[in-house]
Image (cartoon, rainbow, N blue to C red):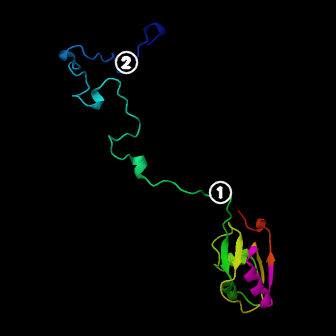
Amino acid sequence: MATQNNLSPARGSKRERKRVGRGNGSGYGTYCGRGVKGQKARAGFKMRPGFEGGQLPLIKRLPQKRGFVNIFRTTYSIVNINALNRFEANSEVTPEKLLAAGVIKSLHHPVKVLAGGEINHPLTIRANKFSAAAKAKIEAAGGKADEVGHAAATI
């Protein structure tokens, strides 16, 4: 049993230091483990991290990052007006109904209605944003464009 007075380090955890230049019998004589001549054999040699012997370093070969990413950007689920023709006349179209009809993929983003295409019948559309042209087309068809706050889009 090991007690405090007879503790010893684990086997292989301690090593004697390498004594270079003490004869060829030691294994570190003549060139002292530095090989033959060259930059790395000289005294005081230090290689900076990433140095590749004069070859263009990896860090310079990779493309540089450019521009920036706006972390405050709002991503909208886009709906064109022609996609609203699938709903019955005079019905109310909400983001939930758009999701059920497969017009948008999820309710994680606010819905924005754009003026792509034509609308044939009046609808009451509730969305987070409308383009000016989309609003004009909806009202020209006898419908109503209700802008709801961003809280309507569930996160």
Q: Is residue 100 visible?
A: no
Secondary structure, mark 2, is loop
Within 10 Å of disc 2 (Cα), the crowding (few <14, some 14-19, many 20+) is: few
Secondary structure, mark 1, is loop
Q: Residue furthest top?
A: 5
- Verify whether residue 147 appears in magenta: no
Q: Is 122 or 90 nearer to us in this picture?
A: 122
Q: Which residue is mark 1?
A: 71
Look at discs 2 and 1 and give the one toward the viewer.
1
Q: Residue at x 80, y 90 (%)?
A: 142
On the image, the x and y values in percent for residue 87 come to: 71, 87
Q: Which residue is mark 2?
A: 14
Magenta-highlighted residues: 129-145
On the image, the x and y values in percent for residue 22 come to: 24, 13
Instruction: Kindly indicate the quadrant of the structure image that contains residue 101.
Output: bottom right
Quarter that holds the N terminus:
top left
Image: 12 above or below 114 = above
In-image side of 66 versus 6 (left or right): right
Quarter that holds the C terminus:
bottom right
Which three-letter amino acid code belongs to the residue tagged 2?
A: Lys
Which three-letter amino acid code belongs to the residue tagged 1?
A: Ile
